[in-house]
């Protein structure tokens, strides 16, 4: 028995983050949820708004500490907290706090697949694995926001959604 991941992790201490690193426990930060709560705090009653802003700030500080400590990180979102279709914003929210674009992309691919135990099928582009990928314009290592503008989505080697609508 054990824990494979902790989602959100808003108030994790540095000691807990160090233990997570030592045990190989993933952090799935869901930066999108914390960011959205912080940005929409003014729509809540005053006592809840203050807590929302504080939690959003604490989440950012925890994420920076997790990066510094070297906790394994996998991409995840809390769809339902924010409008549908914004998931890729998670990449830039992670890089805004110091994660490299390459590490953010790995968090959303290889590391997420490892966490889910499906890395033999997905997570990297290799012979024998499912041909699941998203094509975006430009070089995402130079502009992580390109992930927010997919040209097409391929699943099992077939384009299932494209910018042209096919």
Image: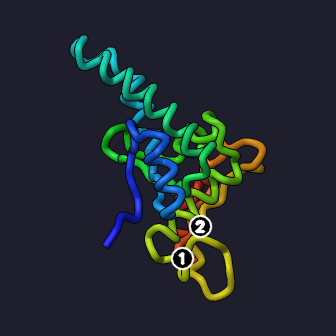
Q: Nearer the viewer, residue 116 or 68?
A: 68
The image shows a total of numbered marks equal to 2
- Viewer-nearest residue: 116 or 18: 18
Quick check: 55 above or below 79?
A: above
Q: Is residue 128 or residue 56 the one in the foreground?
A: 56
Q: CA distance from mark 1 to mark 2?
A: 7 Å
Q: Residue at x 65, y 43 (%)?
A: 99
The image position of residue 89, as x and y in percent, is 53, 41
Q: Which residue is mark 2?
A: 110
Residue 5 in view of the camera: yes
Q: Which residue is mark 1?
A: 119
Image point 37% across, 28% down: which residue? Answer: 55
Q: Residue at x 68, y 80 (%)?
A: 126
Q: Residues within 10 Å of mark 2 (few under 14, many from 20)?
A: some
Instruction: Give residue 67's quadrant in the image.
Output: top right
Residue 86 seen in render: no
Q: Position of residue 111 (x, y in %)?
A: 56, 64
């Amino acid at each position: 028995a054990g824990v494979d991941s902790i989602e959100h992790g808003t108030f994790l201490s540095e000691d807990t983050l160090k233990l997570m690193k030592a045990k190989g426990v993933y952090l799935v930060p869901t930066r999108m949820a914390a960011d959205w709560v912080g940005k929409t705090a003014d729509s809540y009653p005053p006592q809840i708004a203050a807590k929302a802003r504080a939690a959003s700030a604490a989440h950012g500080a925890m994420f920076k500490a997790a990066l510094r400590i070297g906790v394994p990180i996998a991409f995840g979102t809390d769809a339902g907290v924010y409008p549908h279709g914004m998931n890729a914003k998670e990449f830039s929210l992670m890089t805004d706090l110091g994660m490299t674009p390459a590490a953010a992309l790995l968090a959303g691919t290889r590391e997420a697949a490892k966490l889910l135990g499906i890395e033999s099928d997905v997570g990297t582009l290799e012979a024998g694995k499912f041909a699941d990928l998203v094509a975006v314009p430009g070089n995402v290592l130079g502009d992580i926001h390109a992930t927010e503008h997919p040209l097409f989505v391929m699943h099992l080697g077939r384009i299932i959604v494209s910018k042209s609508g096919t």
